[in-house]
Image (tube, rainbow, N blue to C red):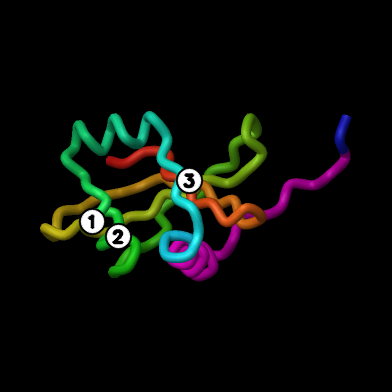
Amino acid sequence: MSTAKRRPPLSDERVLERIRWLFEEGTIDRTFHFDARAEQRNVTQVDIKVLLSGECKVADKQYSSEHKSWTYTIEGFDEHEEPVSVVVCLDLRRSILKLITVF
């Protein structure tokens, strides 16, 4: 049994800072679920870029025991000024922004 403590979630400001850096400088890993939902909802990579680079906020933070990491729901607007939310996970050690789902 592991006695390691779970790290607390990042602050909202830090989450957005890291997401924006990873989006520009890191690797983007899109899950199959993300791609399926993006297609269903007509959300493009441009929409995600507009969301993450514009006025957005961290709406939720959830810890996944299964993946041993935090997920963050980011809310904002797409290129057509329609509301959009994306759930992401940050792998800062490997510089990966994982896009989990979009709604």
Residue at position x 37%, y 30% in the image = 33
Image quarter hosting the N terminus: top right
Q: Nearer the viewer, residue 82 or 48?
A: 48
Q: Earlier in the sequence, mark 2 or mark 3?
A: 2
Number of residues whose C-alpha sits closer than 10 Å to that of mark 2, classed few (under 14), some (14–19) or many (20 or more) = some
Residue at position x 31%, y 35% in the image = 35
C-alpha separation, residue under disc 2 versus residue under disc 3: 14 Å
**Could you tell whether 92 is left or right of 26 in the image?**
right
Q: Is residue 17 magenta?
A: yes
Which numbered disc covers residue 18? none
* The quadrant where residue 75 appears: bottom left
SS at badge 1: helix
**Residue range corresponding to the magenta coloring:** 3-21
Residue type at mark 3: give it.
Lys
C-alpha separation, residue under disc 2 versus residue under disc 1: 5 Å
Residue labelled with disc 1: 46
Are the residues tagged 2 and 1 within 8 Å (C-beta)? Answer: yes
* The quadrant where residue 81 appears: bottom left
Residue type at mark 2: give it.
Lys
Number of residues whose C-alpha sits closer than 10 Å to that of mark 3, classed few (under 14), some (14–19) or many (20 or more) = many
Number of residues whose C-alpha sits closer than 10 Å to that of mark 1, classed few (under 14), some (14–19) or many (20 or more) = few
* The quadrant where residue 69 appears: top right
Q: Whole-percent x and y of residue 64? A: 59, 36
Q: Whole-percent x and y of residue 86? A: 35, 47
Q: Is residue 84 magenta?
A: no
Residue labelled with disc 3: 98
C-alpha separation, residue under disc 3 versus residue under disc 1: 16 Å
Q: Up-down: is 41 above or below 54? A: above
Residue labelled with disc 2: 49
SS at badge 3: strand
Q: Whole-percent x and y of residue 73? A: 41, 49
SS at badge 2: helix
